[in-house]
Image (cartoon, rainbow, N blue to C red):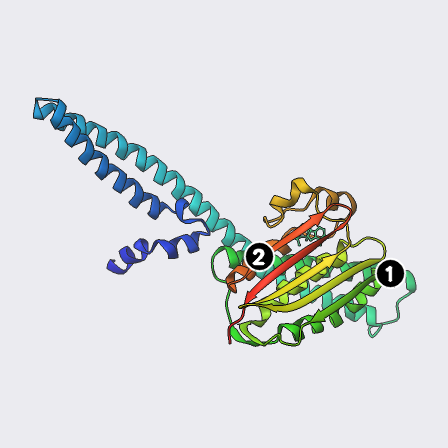
Amino acid sequence: MLGNIFAQLNIKAQCREYGIYLWQCPQFLFLLMGSVIVITIMVSYAIGTRYIADPETVILAVLSLAMILLIIAQIIVQSFERLAEANRLKSEFVSVVSHQLRTPISNLKWATELLMSGRLGSIEPPQTEYFQILKENLTRIGETVADLLIVSKIDTGRLPLKIEKVSVEKAIRDLISLFEPFSKASNVAIQFSCETNVPEILTDSMQVRVIMENLLDNAIRYSQEKGQIEMKLEKKGKNLHFTIRDNGIGIPQTDQKFIFQKFFRSSNVLRYQTRGSGLGLYITKAMVEKLGGRIGFMSQEGKGSTFWVQLPIRY
Ligand code: ADP
């Protein structure tokens, strides 16, 4: 019982559970409105006693005011409570659905690969083509489900952090090798330069990989004919500074302020390109900030984009 009350008073934990900002948290609003009511009662009593001779009238006026404020506060807190609960249920729903979909999707992918391998009987070229389409689409669904799972963890503050010594340079080089078939197929050339004094840092290797992967994947996907990507890693003061520049389709000026929002895709991308969920940069920004860093970009439609990430150097 007492533990429950203390848990309710832990506003930060409650915000995290509901996946909302502090000012939207019912517990915080309850404390805020309570303080406003107490201050209003005291101030109105002080003013009332100065200007109204009859003390009973003063008390009656103050009590009426307090009553009205209490009712308003109750309505506000209750509305936010319902909103917060809906938000929590939404995150939980996304998390449960993503978890439940993961296994059947991998099973489907595995079964498709088995059929394609010909071990269960030979398949003809037209069938191979359809199996290939099936496999590609399953991969996309799998990626979206994985992204949704990460988003639900971010929104409920349950994204785990595993700190270890990480070579960001190696992570980038590994990623470039991994993306080579994709970049070659897209006719995109990738260049990477790294300063010699870049140290290994204490950070989360999985999150660093996801950050770099999302930025490189975007740079390749949003490239134009004869794409050129330049990546650079350097040490700047107390930070590692990573930039990735492409000469792709760029981001329209009017869309730039929304680019890190969940599910946002800019208007030019929607015209030409269908693949994508609009979750990559939301995840990337959340992870960069969780690692104590910063992220930003500059872009010009039709000319290209440069994204930069700054990660603190911790040994
Ligand atoms: P997705 O790429 O799956 O749509 P992201 O969250 O990674 O989602 O990116 C959000 C949007 O930002 C993209 O849809 C695209 O409009 C824009 N964007 C991101 N990176 C680039 C880039 N390098 N060049 C042009 N537009 C980009």
Q: Position of residue 57 (x, y in %)?
A: 12, 23
- Residue wearing tag 2: 285
Q: Is any atom of residue 142 visible in this view? A: no
Q: Secondary structure at mark 1?
A: helix
| Quadrant hosting residue 49 | top left
At a point 80% along the width and 68% down the height, the residue shown is 115
For this orientation, the residue located farthest to the right is 125
**Residue at the spot x=17%, y=25% of the render?**
61
Mark 1 surroundings: few (<14), some (14-19) or many (≥20) residues within 10 A? few
Image spot of residue 78 (x, y percent): 36, 40
The answer to whether the beta carbon of the residue marked 1 is less than 8 Å from any atom of ligand 1 is no
On screen, 287 above or below 80? below
Question: Could you tell whether 244 is left or right of 130 in the image?
Answer: left
Q: Amino acid under label 2?
A: Lys
CB under 8 Å between discs 1 and 2: no
Q: Is residue 193 visible?
A: yes
Q: Amino acid at mark 1?
A: Glu
For residue 76, side relative to residue 34 (left or right): right
Residue 230: give x, y in percent of width and height.
74, 63
Q: Earlier in the sequence, mark 1 or mark 2?
A: 1
Q: CA distance from mark 1 to mark 2?
A: 37 Å
User: Along the horizontal axis of the image, is 156 left or right of 174?
Assistant: left
The N terminus is located in which quarter?
bottom left
- Residue drawn at (85%, 57%), measured in percent from left and top? 226
Disc number for residue 82: none
> Which residue lies under the disc numbered 1?
129
Q: Is 53 situated above or below 175?
A: above
Judging depth in this view, the residue of 139 and 43 nearest the camera is 43
Identify which residue, 192 or 45, lies in the foreground. Answer: 192
Dot 2 surroundings within 10 Å: few (below 14), some, or many (20 or more)? some
